[in-house]
Amino acid sequence: MVNAAQIRHYLEEVSDPEIPVLTIIDLGVVQEIYFTDPTWIIELTPTYSGCPAMQQIEVDLLAKLQEKGIANAQVKHVLSPAWTTDWISEQGRQKLRMYGIAPPVNESDKSTLFAEPPRVACPKCNSMDTRMVSLFGSTACKAQYQCKQCLEPFDYFKCLK
């Protein structure tokens, strides 16, 4: 009989469709895994309301469990508490850096539209001499930055709290 820890281990093989270097475990969207006879329930929290990747994550998660011989699984979407970038694992943050995406930094005040953009280290050269090019990057959860030292553009994974 499989247990919740084994299922969590299997889910470490399921990548985020928008940032394939991250697993759904790295991203922190898997909340709970439990058995309610005769079904395994996997609770997922979307990174934000309407995230287009959640449907694909569910398909990939269930396919991975089928591949591992678990046919009695169901995904339950949980909206509260809301997902936060604090839930990204340290390993996930390192993977983002290595992939060329700056991980979220602890922004002091996200309530002000006209506040200074967060200071973000370049994931390529580690310089803090960077600038925001656009608040919107390749996906809604990222902003576009450029390093003033190495001149490389990069995505920044926005901080959500």
Image: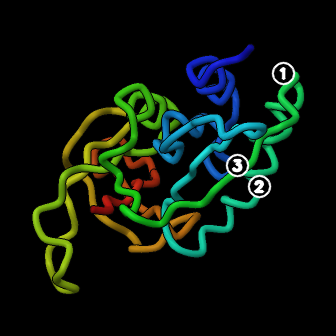
Label 2 sits on residue: 56
Residue 109: % across, % down: 12, 70
Q: How far is disc 1 from disc 2 in space, using C-alphas?
A: 18 Å
Badge 1 crowding class, 10 Å Cα cut-off, few under 14, some 14 to 19, many 20 or more, is few
Label 3 SS: loop
Q: Is residue 61 left or right of residue 24?
A: right
Label 1 sits on residue: 68
Return the residue nearer the eye: 5 or 150: 5
The part of the image, by quadrant, that contains residue 161 is bottom left
Q: Amino acid at mark 2?
A: Gln
Residue 113: % across, % down: 22, 85
Return the residue nearer the eye: 52 or 136: 52
Q: Residue at x 74, y 51 (%)?
A: 58
Q: Amino acid at mark 3?
A: Pro
Label 2 SS: helix
Return the residue nearer the eye: 89 or 146: 89
Q: Amino acid at mark 1?
A: Lys
Q: Residue at x 63, y 17 (%)?
A: 6
Q: Residue at x 20, y 49 (%)?
A: 129
Establish if 117 lies above or below 31: below
Q: Is residue 154 left or right of residue 53?
A: left
User: Which residue reaches farthest top?
Assistant: 1
User: Which residue reaches farthest left?
Assistant: 108
Label 3 sits on residue: 17
